[in-house]
Each structure stands twice: as C-alpha cells, then as structure tokens.
Image (tube, rainbow, N blue to C red):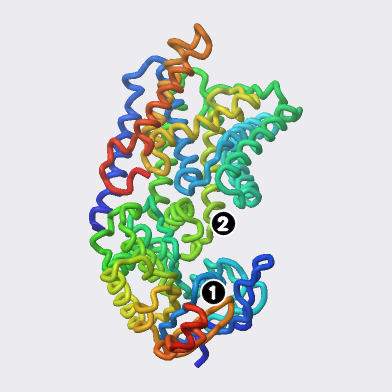
Amino acid sequence: MDKNFAARRRRDLFVAAALAVIAALAPLFVKDVYVQNILILTLMYAALSQSWNILSGYCGQISLGHALYFGLGAYTTALLFMKFGVLPWFGMLAGGTLSALIAMGLGYLCFRLRGHYFVIATIVIAEITLLLFHNWDWAGAALGIDIPVRGDSWLKFQFTRSKLPYFYFALVLACVAWFVTWWLEDSKWGFWWRAVKDNPEAAESLGVVVFNSKMGAAAVSAFLVAVGGSFYAQFVSYIDPESVMGFQFSLLMALPAVLGGIGTLWGPVLGAAILIPLTELTRSFIGGSGRGVDLIVYGTLIVLISLALPRGLVSLFSSRKGAAR
Amino acid sequence: MTALLETRGVWQRFGGLVANSDVSISVGRGEIVGLIGPNGAGKSTLFNLIAGVLPPTQGTIWFDGVDVTHMPAAERCVRGVGRTFQVVKSFETMTVIDNVIVGALVRTTVMREARRKAHEVLEFTGLAARADVLASDLVPAEKRRLEVARALATEPKLLLLDEVLTGLTPTEAQTGVDLVRKVRETGVTVLMVEHVMEIVMPLVDRAIVLDLGKVLVEGKPSDVVRDPKVISAYLGDRHAQSA
C-alpha cells in the first residue's frame, strides 16, 4: 500500500514535468500572437486556481473574494515601480507578503464564520476594497495606472516586442503553484486542511488547531494569487480597479478548480486548460454580435459539466479511490 | 499515585437546565470505567466537558496532574486525551488510512512515520484491509472502529469512548468489547459512556451511574446493577422494591 502511494506521488510529479516540458516547447509551434495570449492566460489562471484551491478546495473555506489579493499584488507592484522605482521582482514579493498578511488579518476576523456566511464576507470585503481603490487618488483612483514603459528587460520585467517572456513566467508560476500543492498535499498541513474541511470538530479532537490551519492556508493561497496579480499588471501594463480587482477574477479563479475537481491536485490545471480557451474563443467568435451569447454558451457548458460530473473532470480520469473529492 | 482524570465539583448549566450538578469523579490509571445512566442523565455533557468541547460553568477538571478546565480540545489531545463521537464524525472524503494519519500527526510531523503508525493502528483495530477505502464507503460498525483507530493514533493516555457499542449487532458489539480490552492491555485508560448494560457491565472495572445530572452510585458493576437506586432510576420505584 505504501508502495502504491509513493508510486502515485512519483507518477504525479512525472506527469507534471512532462506537461511542463510540452508547454515549454509550445511556442516553437505556436507563432500566432493571439493564441500565445490565450496560452499565457490559461497558464496564469491555472496558477491562480491552483492557489485558490489551497484555501477553498483543500481547507474548505470557500472564498469568492480572491480578486482582492490579485488586485493587491497588481497594485503593489505597479505603485512601487511607478512611485519609488522599485523593480517589479521586489514588488512581486512585497505584494505577496502584503496579501498574505492581509489574508491572515481578515482570516482572524472571518474564520469564525461558517459556510455561506464566510463566502458572503469574502465577497463583501473584496467589493469594499474595490470601492476604496476606485476613490484612492494616490493610487490612480478610477483612472488606474499606466505602467511606464522603460524598454524590454528581464530586470524590469517588461517586454513590448514579444509575449514569450510572459509566457515562460506564467509557465513557471503555474509549475510553482502546482508543486507547492503537490508538496503540501502530503504534509501535516495538507492533512490538517482536509480534516478541517471534512469535520472541524473531529479534527480538533485529534489535535488539529483548526484556526491556525485556516490561517496557514489563507496565507499561502493569498501570497501565490498576489504574485499572479503582479505578473498580470506587468503583462497588461495598465491597471485600473475594475480590471484587476473586479468580481469576475474571483469567479475565474474558482471556476477552473470547481469544474476540474475541487480539492484535487489536477483539478485546477484541467479546469483552466478547458475553461480559459473556451472563454476566449467563445468571446472572439460569437461575443461581438449580440453581447452575451458567448456567456450563454460558456454558462451552459459549466452547468452541463457540473450536472454530469459533480466531482469535477478529474473523476473521469481517475479510478483511484479518494482522488476525486 | 494520583488519578489520571478527576473532575471536582463540576457544574454545567444550559440556561435554566442543569445538565451536571456537582459531579466529582475520578478515573485511575489503567482502569476501564463505564459512565452509565438513563437518557438525559448528563453523561454526554460530562463527556464533552472532559474532552474539552466546552468549559464547565463551575468546577475544575484535572488530567494527569494538570488543571485542564479551560484547555481547548486540541491541546488536551496533545496531552493525551483521545475521544470518539457518539454520532460518528469520519473525514468522509478521505481514505481510512488518511483519517488515521491525521491522528498520528499529533506525535510526529514526519509523514513516513505517521503513515507507519497509522498502518500499525489499522492492523490493531482490524481495519487494515480497508485502508484505501473512502471513509464514506464504510459500514456503520467499521466507522465506529475508525473513530477508535483515529483516536488511538494520537497515542492517548485516556481514551474516551462515546457509545461505541450502541446500535451494533451482537457479534459486532462483541468484537468491539474485545477491542476495548486489547486497548487497555496496551496501557491505555478507558472511560466509556454506554447504554447497553449487558455488554458494558462485564467489561468495565468500575461503573459510575449518573442520574438527573448527579452521581447516583459508583462501584463494582455487579453491585451497581443490583442497587435499588439504580433500578429505580432506570425503571421506576415499583421495580426497585421488588428487587
């Protein structure tokens, strides 16, 4: 049994490495900038969803306010660069750390809430912050921030001529988020999180400090999402409150994980690989005409998949017990 | 040698309802003690106070020489209190082995060590063959045993069993009784709440009978079942006189 378990973990790692190599080679064949753009977004959402999955999937604290951390990452990086000339790499770390701290602060207040009340709190807090940024003049208010272009360089993490550097960064980010999940899955934290999700009272009786578990999950989750936000700010080079902190980001982080399989290692990757191209394609092919047709198609698909496979798409692939939760 | 567990003058009120009034009991090391009594006697409340689900309104609880009255449940577990739940609370989306690993992680953070310990406990409780099954797929008797296995993985000094033998078939209950004996042989003290008298009485060294929130009688099982006060608490005064 132990051998099976170890073999499964190794297989997961191997499959991930193989997928990463395939993805890394993709630009050799994909020269179309539009398609490259879709690939970048797919990788980014895979990373974001994977991070969201740590708090909401593994630890079971459903957040629909992760746009907050995404936006904080984007704003921290952009503001530090514009106002103080701090390189985006440091901005990324600062944004991640700030988000992790805020996530713990909010967790301190909100983790007493259970179920739907917690979800509502996450939405409300993200919306309040969005409004604050709308009215914060120093941070550009509703007009947002145009990140000054200082020429292509890795140091400043700016590229105007080619999208490929962004592609590779997004790939690394997705790999890191996946690997962190893989690593945590078979650790004390991973077990504590799943126990907290399934039954906090029983978890407590087994020595699990429920509150600390949730705080840990929130911090890791927020940090990684904020790094994603920092990346996004550099990638689009213009941010305003709605375009980095809007509610749609919270949804777009949650949906791939839910669709692919919430609380699973592969769910977010699989979900993002299907959802994000689908979003982009429906938008570009049928989005222009009647405004909303793309969303109808998109929404219908989500409903159909959830009805047919309530445990997510990974349940199709995996016969192993306990894999699909 | 001091008792492993002691409650001193414990009261628990829920609004106007007094669930426990002035309960002082003690459990010695290595004992199997049965906590019995009719419905509403306050057994479960006392049990939850000892496990640390909530602090008592008044009085103190001592475990292993330490005042644990206000200690949270998780910390009590670290100190050596293991428990099961009357209504089973398995981690349903996790496999049986993973359920037990959660318990084992109290004593180690090395995953390989926790996994080894979990296998050992599953072997001990007779669940080894079901290790890779989802907890939600277990039958009720197995779920009860999983509760015990999980608690044992935390290496408790005191194991609190909340009606683990209730609602089982006679064969299943007998397997349960054997398991409790085996647990005690490993040096674990057991305090069990039970309804099914005929199964519990031969098993326990000592029985504490609660009625209306108070300790009614305490003593050897054979004496307790003949005590008129106990019979009257269970069956009414008429039966007590004829006994």
Quick one: SS at disc 2?
Answer: helix
Query: Could you say which is closer to the camera, residue A208 or residue B48?
Result: B48
Point 29% across, 39% down: residue: A15
Question: How many residues crowd mark 1 within 10 Å: few (<14), some (14–19), many (20+)?
Answer: many
Image-based side of B52 in relation to A303, left or right: right
Q: CA distance from mark 1 to mark 2?
A: 33 Å
Q: Residue at x 41, y 83 (%)?
A: B32
Q: Which amino acid, mark 1?
A: Ala
Q: Which residue is the site of mark 1? A: B41
Which of B127/B64 is in front? B127
Up/down of A260 relative to B41, above or below: above
In this view, B166 is above or below A21: below
Q: Nearer the viewer, residue B69 or B192?
A: B192
Q: Nearer the viewer, mark 1 or mark 2?
A: 1
Which element carries disc 1, helix, strand or loop? Answer: loop
Mark 1 on the same chain as mark 2: no
Q: Could you say where residue A56 lies in the image, as x and y percent from the top left?
A: 49, 43
Residue behind mark 2: A211
